[in-house]
Image (cartoon, rainbow, N blue to C red):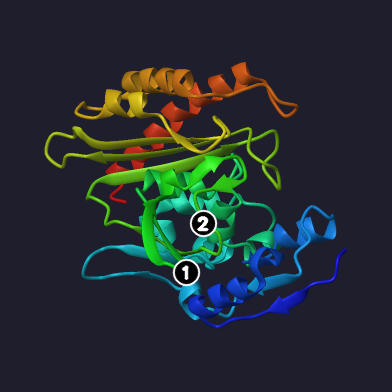
Amino acid sequence: MKAFKYLSPTTVEEAIAFHGQHSETAKYMGGGTDVIVKVKEGWMEPDFLISLKKIKEMSELHKNAATGELSIGAMVTHATLEKSLMIQNEYPIIYDAVSNIGSLQVRNVGTIGGNLINAVPSADGAIPLIALDGVALLHGPEGERSVAVKDLFVSPYKTILKPMEILKKITIPPQAPHTGSAYIKFGRRAAMELPLIGIGILLSLDEIQGICTKARICLGVAAPTPMRAFDAEKLLKGKKIGEALLIEAGKIAADESKVRDSVRGKAWHRKEMIRVHVKRMGIKCLELINAGH
C-alpha cells in the first residue's frame, strides 16, 4: 500500500482548501469503508487523504419542526439512521435500506454520503432518497449548489460532482399526510451481499377518497444508475390503488428497467423480481398508511 498523509479539517472550507493545495494527489474520505480498501488494494494511490469526520455540521441529523424538512449530513452513518426512532417511524423507506447495508461494523462507520458518492448501481442508500425527492447540497470552490439526488449519477462510479466539490448534506422535503414508503433489497441471502435488485416505493393518498396523489417507484441494479419508473408512477397517480393496479405497475416498471445478465443474476430473473416486489412494497405502503404511519 502506498504511503499517504492524513489531513483532518474541521470545516468544509478548510477541506476544500486542503484539496486545492494538493490538487489531484488528494482524496476526500468519509467513513473510509470503500476508500481504505481501494488504497490497500492499489486501485487508488492518493498522496493525501482528507478526512471529513471532524466537520461537525456534516454529521448532523435533524428535522425542522416548523417546516417539516429533514436534513441528513453526508457524514451521518448508516447505524445512526438505523437507530433513529424518527427515521424508523417517519421515514421507514430509509430504515429499510440502511438496516440492510453491509455488516454492523460497516454500518457503524459507513456514511450515507459515501454510499451516494460511490455511485454504484447497487447503492441501497440512493433509492429511498430518490423516492423521497431528496436534494443534495454540494459545496465547492465556487460556492454551494443544489441538485436532486436522482440527478447526481452519471454512470457507474461517476457523479456530477466537480473537482474538489463535497457532498455536504441531503434535505428531504416535508412529506404529505397519508404517505407510506418501503424498500426491499432482494438477494440470494440476507446478510452482507449486494442486492440483485433494490426496489423503493412511496405512495401518498388523498385523505377523503383514498386517491393516489403521489407515486414514486425507484429501482436499483436495474440500470447503470439508480432510476425511477416514470411510466409505472403515472399509472398509479390519480387512481384508487389496489392489488390489481399494483400488479400492472410492476409489469410496467419491469419493462422500463434496463436490467442485464451478469455473473450474479439473469436479466429475466431481475425483471420478475421487479414485477413481484413493486406489488408487495406497494401493498406494504398501503398498510403503513392505514396504520397511521
- Residue 221 in the image: above or below residue 40: above
Q: CA distance from mark 1 to mark 2?
A: 10 Å
Packing grade of label 1 (10 A; few <14, some 14-19, many >=20) is some
The kind of residue tagged 2 is: Lys
The kind of residue tagged 1 is: Pro
Q: Which residue is mark 1?
A: 141
Q: Secondary structure at mark 1?
A: loop
Q: Position of residue 139 (x, y in %)?
A: 45, 66
Q: Secondary structure at mark 2?
A: loop
Q: Single out the residue that lies furthest toward the right.
A: 1
Q: Position of residue 144 (x, y in %)?
A: 39, 66
* Image quadrant assignment for residue 70: bottom left
Who is closer to the viewer here, 71 or 40? 40
Residue 52 in sight from this viewpoint: no
Q: Is residue 11 left or right of residue 29?
A: left
- Residue 180 in the image: above or below residue 260: below
Q: Which residue is mark 2?
A: 162
- Residue 45 in the image: above or below residue 158: below
* Image quadrant assignment for residue 181: top left
Q: Is residue 288 left or right of residue 138?
A: left
Residue shown at the point (61%, 77%) measured from the top left: 18
Q: Counting residues from the N terminus, which is met first, the one under dot 1 or under dot 2?
A: 1
Q: Position of residue 155 (x, y in %)?
A: 56, 39
Q: Is residue 190 left or right of residue 198?
A: right
